[in-house]
């Protein structure tokens, strides 16, 4: 009973936040909607006994990713000057709408086609087994460092590449002796 | 070791009856009231001690020794008119103080503020106290992600500062909040990494288990505190990162009165300002509590008699907690403010690499104790490799920092040519 109430509230937060992201005219309000959505997802994780994932969801997505979004929005000052009626990419709104409807269709089709066979949609234990009753961290850690070690290491290599790329992009090129002096 | 550590609050394991609900309500009240009262005291102590350190008297009008000064200030702020600037984003402007204040309260929910952590007659440590006929932890919520909730709260608190600065629609708050956000996000990394060392040696994320681990008998006269067990370095990293995370001097660039009026909260007044003010000082209390829990054994301590045995945990906890706010006041009275680039250098080039390397070393030392099936110690070789690797990485990092600094200096010289 309580689980259903929590689910409904969290789902409302997720959907409301998502609508806010799409509909808000102000980029900062859109980012706030995104945070609301992430918190809803964290609550859903708790509802599913995935406590560790819930904490990580807030720390990583709300605490780091969206903070950086907001940081860029503030630094670039796009929050006040952006005119949303001008579209930089023609036709992206109808395309995005169509893609969204298609995705919803797939989700609904899976839900209804699998009615007879409950395992398809829910009730399937995750790849690391049921999280209920166990220590999340131990289960996740064991799975990450045994079965999924390769994927884990590849991900860390990917992140290192991203860091190196960021450093290369952010590095100011050194002026050579013959270059013209440009007054700032 | 796991057998020694009780898992989960025994209060909620059994049947939920009226006594249990009463106890939970009582603990909720305590967890709400303690930080609030301590914050009021902290503000007074800070003004008094800081006054003393700069040869002033400090508040001395309201109540004996001015102890009611915070109450007087609070009453004043609560009855003032709250202004909203013309160019403010009204919704976000109203929301921001709560984003600052609510996480400050929440942290205390996972901190064990008492409990009997002395070994029972059968040698187990359960840290429970029997109140109203129920065995219970003196802690509101022994969450599974435990100490991660501290990081959750501090990452939410960033939004309070950031959105307050942005929504004010004015220059100085925006500058202050951009600085603050960069600072808090940078130091959150160091904070999290130094936490890993504690989790590594304690073997659990739960704050209760971390305290129970530290209540185990140590080597010789030394207690088994994480301060010693993790080798001091993570403690200092965590302490400095916490100082930066809550924008206390010498890392108070966010407010930098001489440059930014008052930083992110310049445009705030009345009760909304009071919320920021409370959140800021409450952070010293909650971070003091978190550091005491993580590194100084929290409520773990000997039973010295006189008082009932279960109360000693609480006494030890508050004694340990009080150390850190005092040090932060001392910092404020003595240390000059860091420059922005110095702050970032300290965070990214010293604290983060240091705590990363320290985690690797700790893991290597622990793996050196691994015993194979034939009773031989098999972990030595990996430990030596890791040690050599960390050393090499440290040398490379130092070299690259030196080269970078030299190049920057050369570039500066060229400008003057």
Image (cartoon, rainbow, N blue to C red):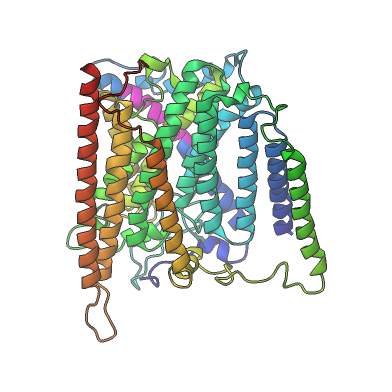
Q: Is residue B298 in view? A: no
Foreground of the two, B276 or B168: B168
Image coordinates for residue B275, horizontal then vertical, percent: 52, 27
Numbered disc total: 0
Image coordinates for residue B171, horizontal then vertical, percent: 49, 16
Prevalent SS, magenta region: helix
Q: Residue furthest front?
A: A178
Q: Is residue B175 left or right of residue B12?
A: left
Image coordinates for residue B60, horizontal then vertical, percent: 35, 16
Residue at the spot 31% in from the left edge and 52% down from the top edge: B356
Q: Vertical placement of A14 versus A89: above or below?
A: below
Q: Quadrant of residue B67?
A: top left
Foreground of the two, B249 or A98: A98
Q: Is residue A86 in view? A: yes
Q: Quadrant of residue B19?
A: bottom right
Q: Is residue B71 magenta?
A: no
Q: Quadrant of residue B390?
A: bottom left
Q: Is residue B46 magenta?
A: yes
Q: Residue furthest bottom?
A: B374
Residue at the spot 52% in from the left edge and 22% down from the top edge: B273
Residue at the spot 50% in from the left edge and 27% down from the top edge: A75
Residue at the spot 32% in from the left edge and 53% down from the top edge: B297
Image coordinates for residue A66, horizontal then vertical, percent: 55, 40
Q: Is residue B214 left or right of residue B205?
A: left
Check the picture and name the quadrant holding the N terminus of chain B. Answer: bottom left
Range of magenta residues: B36-48
Check the picture and name the quadrant holding the C terminus of chain B. Answer: top left
Q: Vertical placement of B343 versus B207: above or below?
A: above
Foreground of the two, B259 or A159: A159
């Amino acid at each position: 009973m309580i689980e259903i109430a929590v689910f409904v509230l969290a789902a409302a937060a997720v959907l409301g936040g998502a609508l806010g992201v799409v509909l808000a005219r102000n980029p900062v309000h859109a980012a706030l909607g995104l945070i609301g959505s992430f918190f809803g997802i964290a609550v859903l994780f708790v509802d599913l006994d995935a406590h560790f994932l819930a904490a990580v969801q807030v720390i990583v997505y709300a605490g780091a990713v969206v903070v950086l979004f907001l940081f860029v929005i503030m630094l670039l000052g796009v929050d006040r000057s952006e005119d949303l009626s001008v579209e930089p990419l023609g036709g992206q709104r109808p395309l995005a709408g169509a893609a969204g409807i298609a995705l919803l269709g797939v989700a609904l089709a899976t839900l209804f086609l699998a009615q007879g066979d409950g395992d398809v949609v829910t009730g399937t234990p995750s790849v690391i087994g049921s999280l209920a009753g166990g220590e999340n961290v131990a289960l996740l850690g064991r799975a990450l460092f045994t079965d999924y070690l390769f994927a884990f290491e590849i991900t860390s290599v990917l992140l290192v590449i991203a860091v190196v790329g960021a450093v290369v992009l952010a590095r100011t090129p050194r002026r050579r002796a013959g270059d013209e002096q440009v007054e700032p | 070791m796991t057998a020694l550590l009780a898992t989960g609050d025994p209060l909620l394991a059994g049947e939920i009856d009226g006594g249990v609900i009463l106890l939970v309500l009582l603990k909720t009240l305590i967890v709400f009231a303690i930080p609030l009262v301590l914050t009021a005291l902290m503000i007074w102590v800070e003004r008094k001690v800081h006054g003393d350190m700069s040869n002033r008297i400090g508040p001395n009008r309201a109540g004996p020794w001015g102890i009611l000064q915070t109450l007087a200030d609070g009453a004043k702020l609560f009855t003032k008119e709250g202004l909203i600037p013309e160019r403010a984003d009204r919704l976000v402007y109203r929301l921001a103080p709560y984003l600052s204040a609510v996480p400050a309260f929440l942290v205390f929910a996972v901190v064990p503020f008492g409990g009997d952590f002395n070994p029972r007659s059968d040698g187990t440590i359960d840290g429970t106290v029997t109140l109203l006929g129920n065995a219970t932890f003196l802690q509101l919520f022994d969450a599974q992600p435990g100490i991660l909730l501290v990081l959750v709260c501090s990452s939410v608190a960033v939004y309070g500062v950031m959105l307050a600065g942005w929504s004010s629609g004015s220059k100085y708050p925006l500058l202050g909040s951009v600085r603050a956000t960069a600072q808090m996000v940078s130091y959150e990394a160091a904070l999290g990494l130094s936490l890993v060392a504690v989790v590594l040696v304690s073997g659990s994320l739960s704050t209760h288990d971390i305290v129970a681990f530290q209540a185990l008998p140590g080597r010789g006269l030394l207690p088994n505190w994480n301060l010693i067990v993790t080798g001091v370095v993570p403690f200092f990293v965590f302490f400095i990162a916490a100082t930066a995370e809550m924008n206390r001097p010498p890392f108070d660039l966010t407010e930098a009165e001489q440059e930014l009026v008052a930083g992110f909260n310049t445009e705030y007044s009345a009760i909304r300002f009071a919320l920021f003010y409370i959140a800021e000082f409450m952070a010293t209390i909650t971070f003091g509590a978190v550091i005491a829990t993580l590194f100084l054994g929290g409520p773990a301590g000997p039973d010295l008699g006189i008082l009932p045995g279960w109360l000693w945990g609480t006494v030890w906890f508050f004694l340990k907690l009080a150390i850190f706010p005092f040090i932060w006041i001392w910092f404020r009275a003595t240390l000059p403010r860091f420059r922005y680039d110095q702050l970032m250098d300290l965070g990214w080039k010293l604290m983060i690499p240091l705590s990363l390397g320290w985690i690797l070393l700790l893991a290597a030392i622990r793996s050196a104790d691994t015993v194979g099936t034939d009773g031989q110690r098999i972990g030595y070789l990996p430990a030596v490799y890791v040690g050599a690797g960390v050393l090499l990485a440290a040398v490379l990092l130092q070299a690259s920092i030196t080269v970078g600094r030299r190049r920057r200096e050369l570039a500066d010289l060229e400008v003057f040519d």
